[in-house]
Image: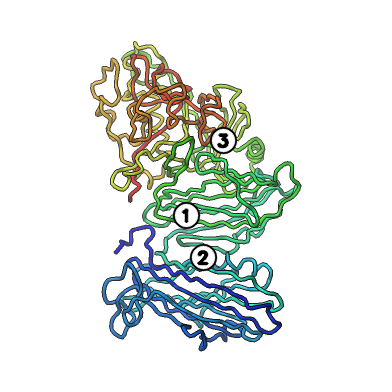
Amino acid sequence: MKKRSKIIALVTTLCLCLSLFVVGVLAATSAKFNVTSTLNFTADGVYVMVDASLKQGADVSSAAVLTEGAPTGQPTFKAYSYPRASGQDYPNGEPSTTYFVNQSGVQADTWAIGDINYTSTNKVVVYEFTVSNYSPFEVQGTVQGISEALATYVEQGQLTITTYTGTSSSSATATGSPTYSFTIPARTNETTPGTTCYKIAVTLNDFMNSLATGEIEMDVSFTEKQAINLNGITYTGENHATLAPSSSNNFIGGANTGSSATWSGLQASLTETNKAVKYRMEVTNNTEAGIKGVGNFTIANQTTPEPSLVAGGVNTYEFTNYTVTEYAQYIQNIQPNDTQVYELVVELNQSATSATINVSISFDFTDDKMYQIEWEGNTYNYVNMGKYPQRYVGNTMNVKLEALLSSNDASLVETGKIYTTFNDCNLPSSTSAKDATPILVESKEYTYIDGNTYVRMETPDFYSSSYTYMNGETVTNQASWYKVEPIQWRVLNPTEIETENAVLLSELALSANTSFYPTSTTSYGDINNYARSDNAIRNYLTTYFYNQALTSEEQAKVTGRNFTEGELEYNGVDEADITSALSDQKVWLPTSADYINAEYGFDSSPITSYVQDKARLCSPSDFALANYSCLSTMSSYTTPARQNGGTVQYWTSSAGSTSSGACNAGYRGSVSGSYVKLEFYAARPALLFNLAG
């Protein structure tokens, strides 16, 4: 039996297949559905009893269990996922992990219903499920299939679907718009279950038109209810820079808690004066462990084009009249008491004057630890964890936020959090001193009415004024704003994460202005030694990045790395306590040996050809560009974040072959050495993280 500590424990799955046939043209007073229903039950080590019935009547309150049916018709059905006590429904023994049994203890796999005849006075059919939960935890049921299959008939007004929930059949009340999820409370004691009655009422409204023959597959799944909150909010505005909560800001339908949620009928009319809409799902974790999930969307009557990939699970879809941007599609490792968001922004294209959309959004939590992206012939595994400023907000939004800040507008609120980066280091006063002090750049964090968090860098420091951000806009030296987003980490050892800590490497280089040492003069000692107390890049990672990017819950899952002298390949190092200085490093730079480790997905040679190892190619974040990161824009070297080209050189923790050099990965994917003082090389952090817990 699975332990309750698992994030998702499958309780029961019911698969209901309905073959819907219409005989001839519907008459004015009668119609006939030939409904054949098959329910397939499976169980996975939990105590659940399902008592189902098919009812019909003039309305829901008067609907009664069918007494007539096909020769094999069974209007009621009862099954258990466990052996039961004699004459009782409560468990007596371990639950099954393969199938349900009936009251006689015989395997029960099929429920045959038979024909249903609709008339003008007998026009409502009710599928009713009473679920008794003998498990010591809450269970959530989720229904999928019937809404999608009957959507056309519902839109045309031929059918109406209404759902009901309550503790019993008589107490079940309508949930407003159809809600395809419900909760079954935990047992009171071993013999007293928690009980919920859930109904789906299908009403035939139009007897004058024929319904096309079709087949419905309805899946009703039960999972251990997760202690999470899902809050959906709609934002509208003239453009993406003016988005604000709409007057009716809650999503219609969908689940507010549980392991999955679906929002349907999210309609928006885009015009030249109201060009943008955003659907935002806030996911708050109240469990004792990290959770994972993925969001997806569809737009009615539209084929979704292939996306343009952006690091961090951001996808851009170009439709004919509008552009859809999906932010944080992959929600990974949301730690306890933390909130992450999934956002869908739809904005009218400049060439279009209007567009009407009907969006459906689903969000599901799974046991998957990672998600995958294929790029340039390689498949990479990722998780999202921690948050850091990364992408530039765009010129329009930048002007908007600056104006709000200047006017002390209440829609922009300072959080009090600071993100600290380096500008340069002050040289020590003598060769014996090891007290080079970095010049700190402190960027304040703000929340905005659009639900996002931003950081303002007052004086960006660009290596070149010709650089462009990931959105294509040219950098400027004016005060700039960057969105705080989940960090996308590449999992270097995906096959070992159940038994070993995951080795995580940031997909983007996250900052620069981080040299090994502010001068290449070797009279200051072992300047290529990553273990030095005044090594600028290690100081940045351990003192600032680690504490500002990760929550305390995330930090609790980090295991420190213990470096040895041999790993760092020192040249001319006179430091006697390397091992001691580099013990328990919570966040660090990989060594040059790490970047030629074939088990991590890299080429085993540091230099293989002119276009070297694509797996080592890395792009800087926009925030790193504003911190003096270099950028090679050659179109031959691409990443998911910069598909037209744009890579960076970034440091390793290893010394180079000379006493004034340290190893770095180049913009073509090579591994070689450079002078330690080059502050335009970037920082690409790594850490050891427990994904198995």
Crowding at mark 2 (Cα within 10 Å: few <14, some 14-19, many 20+): some
* Residue in the picture at 50% in, 78% down: 128
Q: Residue 460 appears at what percent x and percent y?
A: 56, 28
In front: mark 2 or mark 1?
2
* Residue in the picture at 42% in, 44% down: 383
Report the amino acid beneath label 2. Answer: Gln
Report the amino acid beneath label 3. Answer: Arg
Distance from disc 2 to disc 3, alpha carbons, whole Å, reads 44 Å
Q: Is residue 513 visible?
A: no
Q: Is residue 384 left or right of residue 653?
A: right
Q: Residue 542 appears at what percent x and percent y?
A: 37, 33
Report the amino acid beneath label 1. Answer: Thr
SS for dot 3: strand
Q: Is residue 506 left or right of residue 641?
A: left
Which residue, given by chain and number where applicable, does mark 1 sit on? 284
Q: Which mark is residue 456?
A: 3
* Residue in the picture at 53% in, 28% down: 646
Q: Which mark is residue 607?
A: none
Crowding at mark 3 (Cα within 10 Å: few <14, some 14-19, many 20+): many
Sequence order check: which comes first, mark 2 or mark 3?
Answer: 2
SS for dot 2: strand
Decide which of 56, 475 is in the foreground and name it. Answer: 56
Q: Is residue 514 visible?
A: yes
In front: mark 2 or mark 3?
2
- In the displayed structure, 81 sits above or below 53; it is above
Crowding at mark 1 (Cα within 10 Å: few <14, some 14-19, many 20+): many
Residue 528, quarter of the rendered image:
top left
Q: Which mark is residue 144?
A: 2
SS for dot 1: strand
- The quadrant of the image that shows the N terminus is bottom left
Residue at the left extreme, as displayed = 576
